[in-house]
Amino acid sequence: MIRPFTAWSPASIRHKLTLAAIACILVPAVFTLILYNFMTQEAVKRQAITNAESSLHLVGESVTNLLTGMLDVTNYIQVNSGLGTYLKLVASGKESADPYTAFTEKNRVLEQLDSLTYLGSKKYVTVILTNDEYYMNYSVSDFNPLEYKRESWFGRLERFTGMQSLWAGPQPTVFQYDKFDHPYQISVARTLRLESSKIYGYAVVTIMESQIRGVFGSLSEENGIMLLDAEGRIVSARDPEIIGTVFPQRSLIEGMKETSVVGIGGERYLVAQQRMAFNGWRLVLMEPYKEATVNISSIFSRVFVFQLISFAVFLILLLVLVRRFTRPLVRLGKVTSAVQRGNLEVRSGVRGNDEIGRLGLLFDQMLDRVGEMIREVSDNQTRKRKAELKMLQAQINPHFLFNVLNSIRMKVMKRGDPDSAKMIGSLSMLLRMTISREEDAITLHEEIDLLRHYVSLMNLRQKEEVTLLTRVDPEAFLVRVPRFILQPLVENALIHGLGQLAGTITVGAGFQGSQLILTVEDSGRGMEEAERLRILGRIQGGAAGAGEPDGRAMGHDEGPENLSGGSRERAVDQGESSAGNQARAAAQVEVSGRSGGFSGIGLVNVAERMQMLYGGGFRIDVISEPGKGTAIRMEIPVERGDADV
């Protein structure tokens, strides 16, 4: 069971050293940056607030001068005695009856209104009397002053007395000359009253909203400054699209008494405001906090970049040194993995005067010793198998046995029993191949001939005949293979796959790249998956243990209980799909001595022999499904054009 600590820890010492070194460099750097940021952020905030208030104050003075200039004009119209006397006479209908005098007086009033706007910003000045007489410093073709009476704010003027003024804005521009270039205007209006407080006229002073927006241009583009009226509507701003709308953060700034840093929409803003006492309007400055502190933050960024570059340089140097120091360990790890996969020929070649060098030398010496021991064990096992086979052959005197069988066959033929003679001939051929041949390898053609004699012999002794089919690549007939590698498979297919009943056994041989593919397939009952896996495991386990004194996991001594109910299973060889080979192979447990079978060499014995001869180049697989028969598939390394495997 893996402990919690090791479950996430690095797998190699190289990674552990790297992480430890990175931590030793990174922790002090991060601590320094955090400390520096903590010590400077308050000073940065105070400086940013001071800068914002100074900028707002400068803009506020300019805007105040513009709006105060409008009030000065209305004050002049209201308090100028000569102008007031004339306007009152006109409003009461008592102006001079002389046309010339009336014209002169009216012209003098217009000149006075024009003089009010000679200096400073452009202003539209309008005086409207209650009898619809009007005076203005612009052309009536540009705008008819009486249209002011239709404005929504005009009716509220009656509530204003004395020096009280009504501020209206922003309103769509009504002057034809400026309408296209200046979409909005701002107006201040005041009532003109008699001593009895009766209204005899109205004074209206208008400027273009763009004049205030021009003042905002003195600030940087990052500063979001705007002028709000008493209801929170935007009177002027850099973005004309938002003029006339209600400021979204109105409730936020209502309770603010001083400049603050607030969060809006997930971002921090520096917010400052300045109120105007004469109309209740206020200037609001909103600037992203990071933009307000960009200069000081740039210093912090440069320090951070310098530390980051230093960290990267030292980290690269450290990684190079760690890789150099741990390269022998990595080499040893790769060699160990190769040995674990079965490659005992690989060597590390790690040498040196330190502990790692001595470890590499001892490891290579250990592999040399292991190789020698494996060769000794393999030689002993090979000699033991040959001795067992020779002892089996020596149990019967070949010459005596063959002569006797030949005499019996001749007598049987003379008596007119060719079937029995054929049976005796096949038996003689089988025994001759079994005990009179001393060579370990024969041609595949001879091995298949042995199978034909064996099946013919078995057909004579059982009630129903079995058909033996061969599908052999012509090039494969001359390939030399170990003796008795197919007969045990055919025997098991006949007795256990077909249950000694009628059926078909197909033997196939062909090439797949550098591999000779041998298959034995029956049309019998097949087996279940669990049984197939159990049998395949015992076959492969027996082959893996071929070096042990008794490596048979499934031999004749096992008995027929290995095939309970005839269940077998199917497995798809991993190499079949790549070559497109659809041949199947079935595996059956070999027949026991009690079942009367011919072979004394079991299926596991065959796998052991092949494993000893070809090592990792040999593969065996079992394929079976209930009702679809069973097949065995063997792969043997061979060179094409070479008649000896």
Image: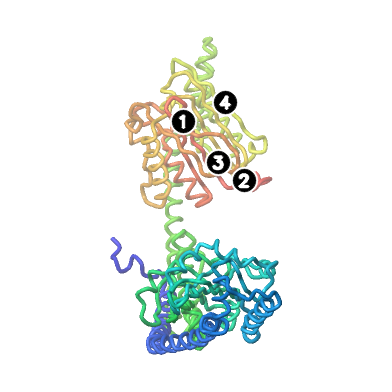
Label for residue 644? Answer: 2
Q: CA distance from mark 2 to mark 3?
A: 24 Å
Q: Is residue 320 visible?
A: no
Residue 20 location, quadrant = bottom left
> Badge 2, how many Cα within 10 Å: few under 14, some, many 20+?
some
Looking at the rendered image, the disc whose residue lies closer to the viewer, 1 or 3, is: 3
The residue tagged 1 is 630
Tell me the amino acid under the disc marked 2: Asp
In the image, 242 versus 465, the foreground residue is 242
What colour scheme was applied to this rendering of the protein? rainbow
Q: Nearer the viewer, mark 1 or mark 4?
A: 1
Q: Quadrant of residue 624?
A: top left
Q: Is residue 51 above or below residue 86?
A: below
For mark 4, what is the residue? 469
Ranked by sequence position, the earlier of labels 1 and 4 is 4
Which numbered disc, 4 or 3, marks the residue that appears first in the sequence? 4
Circle 4 — which element?
strand
Residue on which disc 3 sits:
576
Query: CB atoms at circles 2 and 3 under 8 Å apart?
Result: no
**Amino acid type, label 1:** Thr
For the residue pair 642 and 82, the one nearer the viewer reads as 82
Tell me the kind of residue under disc 3: Glu
Q: Residue at x 40, y 30 (%)?
A: 527
Image coordinates of residue 87 in percent, x first then y, are 57, 76
Residue at left offset 51%, top offset 30%: 521
